[in-house]
Amino acid sequence: MVSLYKFLIKYGTVFALGLGGLIIIWFLVSVNLGLSGMGFDVGTDLVEKSKTTDISFFNSTMYITFFLIILAVVIWLFFGAVGLITNLKGSYKFLITVGVLVLLYIIFYSTSSVDHSSKLYEYVSKPEFYVTESVLKNLSAAIKTTFALFIISIVTLVVSEILGFFK
């Protein structure tokens, strides 16, 4: 595991840039070949050309990008969990912070209410939006939690500056 870490420290950025470059080249080649195959060339007016109903030649690069994003998140979560488990004593501050964050969200979710008489509720409750009361309560709790974290960060910044001034 340590040798893999050293390898990624040494060559990880080059590998990531190289893979990104290959995906960009693959995208450009597939778009160029796809457009040529559909009869487009440099002089084609794309606004007047209505033959754009079956443009799917660049989907492969989108799927590769989505796969790499999902893979990166899974690896990040895995190694984050391994780091938490292997250094449980050093992870207490992080775990307490996550616990407080979850507690804030639960408090804000349980205190959220939906106003059925508002114009916004009338608009978003239409069937084409499919926004339920639960979704509105989740949005309200998320916005309130974000605002609370913003206030906490400002207070922490001011207090740390004041304490730094007296040192």
Image (cartoon, rainbow, N blue to C red):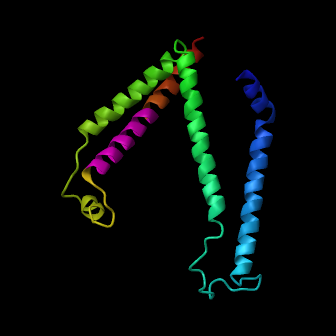
Say which residue appears at 22% left-offset and 58% top-offset.
Answer: 118
Residue 151 image position (x, y, % from top left):
43, 33
Front-lying residue, 122 or 78: 78
Front-lying residue, 94 or 24: 24
Where's the N terminus, which quadrant?
top right
Say which residue appears at 22% left-offset and 45% top-offset.
Answer: 113
Q: From the viewer's perspective, is residue 33 above or below residue 64?
A: below
Taking 18 as reference, is 84 left or right?
Answer: left
- Extreme left residue here? 117
Q: From the viewer's perspective, is residue 50 above or below residue 137?
A: below
Where's the C terminus, which quadrant?
top right
Number of marks in the rendered image = 0
Residue 108 image position (x, y, % from top left):
30, 36
Q: Which residues are magenta?
A: 134-150
Say which residue appears at 77% left-offset and 53% top-offset.
Answer: 21
Q: From the viewer's perspective, is residue 62 above or below residue 34?
A: above
Residue 68 image position (x, y, % from top left):
63, 47
Query: Quadrant location of residue 138?
Result: top left
Front-lying residue, 150 or 91: 91
Taking 147 as reference, is 93 left or right?
Answer: right
Residue 56 image position (x, y, % from top left):
61, 71
Q: Is residue 66 magenta?
A: no
Q: Main secondary structure of the magenta part?
A: helix
Query: Quadrant location of residue 33?
Result: bottom right
Q: Is residue 139 magenta?
A: yes
